[in-house]
Image: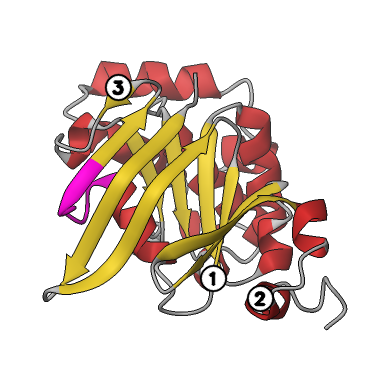
Amino acid sequence: MERLVLKDITLKYYGNPALRIDELKADTPLGVLGCGGAGKSSLIKVIAGLEEIESGEIYINGREVGSLAIKERNISLVSSRTPLMKRKSVYQNLVYPLKKRGVKREGQKRAVKELSAVLPEELKENLHKKSEILSPQGVAALLCFRAMIKKPDLILVDEPHAFIEDFGCFAWLLKQSGVMFIVASYDFELLSLATERFIVIRRGEIIFGGEMTDIAATDDKYIRAMCHPTLGG
């Protein structure tokens, strides 16, 4: 069973088509590649429930979520809209998603304790200190574990180059988690740190789906331009 399925998705902005996806299936982590305005963030918002689709179906782990509210989809979104609270402690940042869900203090403590075996030393040592003191690696780790603490079915990462300085650290931790995830960016080299499977979006439509070797073999000028310098120009 695919962990993510989208069928017949249409999204419009002010009556104009913004996203048109006949079908998208994924059972492994996925990179979403495209230029500015191609529809990457629109796709992330549609899956997260931040945009209301005109039509279509969205399945996560076999459950149709297209008609559900954001909080009922069991998704974590990591984007510039969900930054760290730098004046709050590492602990407060970690449990923030649980507080939003209404999880009581004891439940928050248990969740952090469960994570303690895999938390990097920098986070453990500074658990009750302000997150503003963390290194770029520490920030990346905190963002990743904050996304994982509520045990989501899917993690969505939108344009991480804008707010994660050490994306290599973030991507490594994300891959170790075993959680299904999608990363959207215009930067193919950044995406390739996280996943080997990609889709390419242009004008709101998927024009390519495959692995890195498949992308390297294409002669489509748009795709080759998006993957420069990986494809050598």
Is 103 above or below relative to 185?
A: above
Q: CA distance from mark 3 to mark 1?
A: 28 Å
SS for dot 2: helix
- The answer to whether residue 126 is visible is yes
- Report which residue position mark 3 lands on: 63
Residue flagged by tag 3: what amino acid is it? Arg
Magenta residues, start to end: 48-56
Quadrant, the C terminus: bottom right
Image quadrant of residue 126? top right
Check if residue 54 falls in the magenta segment.
yes
Judged left or right of residue 67, residue 228 is right
Quadrant location of residue 203? Answer: bottom left
Q: Which residue is mark 2?
A: 226
Residue pictured at 63% horizontal, 49% vertical = 170
Residue 51 is situated, as x and y percent measured from the top left of the image, at 20, 56
Provide the residue designation for mark 1.
Answer: 34
| In the foreground, 17 or 49 | 17
Residue at (20, 41) in percent of width and height: 70
